[in-house]
Amino acid sequence: MRADAKKNYSHLLAVAREVITEHGADASMRDIARRAKVGLATLFRHFPTREALFEALLRTNLDALTQRADELEASTSPDEALLSWFREWVAFALSYRGVVAMMAAAHTNPDSALYASCAAVHSASGRLLLRAQAEGTARADMNGDDLFGLMSALGWLVDLPSFAPRADHLFHILSSAILTNRPSNDVGKATC
């Protein structure tokens, strides 16, 4: 990529991050272009779809989240790894309003620009769950799809203003339902 094109790309991402932070995942592409002081065609040349824009915005965070799962898997007990990773997922989900619904739809759609990143997150959560199940500290009757669904549901729910203040409590309830053989006050210590 030429230096000026790279500079434009970085500028568009920075402006998109601001607009989406303010207005959520439904932010207007036209507003992003206007605030970036470029034409809509320029924005679409760099990001042909809304999902392509989100993939560029979220890739670094999702890659870091997936890498974090690998680190936790190698260094922490299975139940603690799953709990820590779930907590970090919720914190990530709160970073952009409306992104969880987009990710939940993308993780099974290979045509989505977000597919690869979402599939990696889904896979990482599944690995951490299997490890905790093998140790006997996570419910045996769930799979990676169930866990990803619960994570997405919690991310979507705490994205709503009426539930955001209850994020820690809801996290505790879900964590207690997923992890077994743990004193409930241990799970309660985990906050988002």
Image (tube, grey):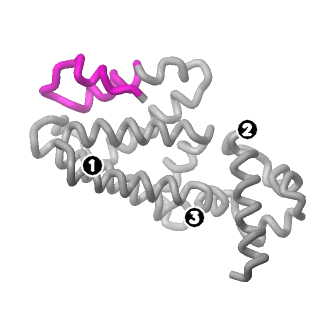
Q: Image quadrant of residue 140?
A: top left
109 vs 82, left or right, is right
166 over 68 or under it: above or below: above
Name above or below for residue 76 compared with residue 187.
below
Q: Which residue is mark 1?
A: 72
C-alpha separation, residue under disc 3 versus residue under disc 2:
23 Å
Examine the rendered structure and indicate whether residue 180 appears above or below residue 93.
above
Q: Residue at x 57, y 31 (%)?
A: 159
Task: Tell me, yes or no, whether the two marked residues, 1 and 2, touch with CB atoms within 8 Å.
Answer: no
Which quadrant is home to the C terminus?
top left
Badge 1 or badge 2: first in the primary sequence: 2
The secondary element bearing badge 2 is classed as helix
- Which residue extends farthest left? 135
- Of circles 1 and 2, which is in front? 1
Q: Earlier in the sequence, mark 1 or mark 3?
A: 1
C-alpha gap between disc 1 and disc 3: 27 Å
Looking at the image, the residue that sits furthest to the bottom is 2
Residue under pointer 2: 22
Hey, which quadrant is residue 137 in on the image?
top left
Q: Residue at x 56, y 55 (%)?
A: 58
- Residue 47, percent across and down? 71, 66
The amino acid sitting under disc 2 is Glu
Quadrant of the drawing holding the N terminus = bottom right
Residue 134, position as x, y percentages in the image? 11, 46
Within-10-Å neighbours for mark 2: few <14, some 14–19, many 20+: few
Q: Which residues are magenta?
A: 169-191
Q: Which residue is mark 3?
A: 113
Q: Secondary structure at mark 1?
A: helix
Where's residue 99, x and y in %?
58, 45
Amino acid under disc 1: Leu
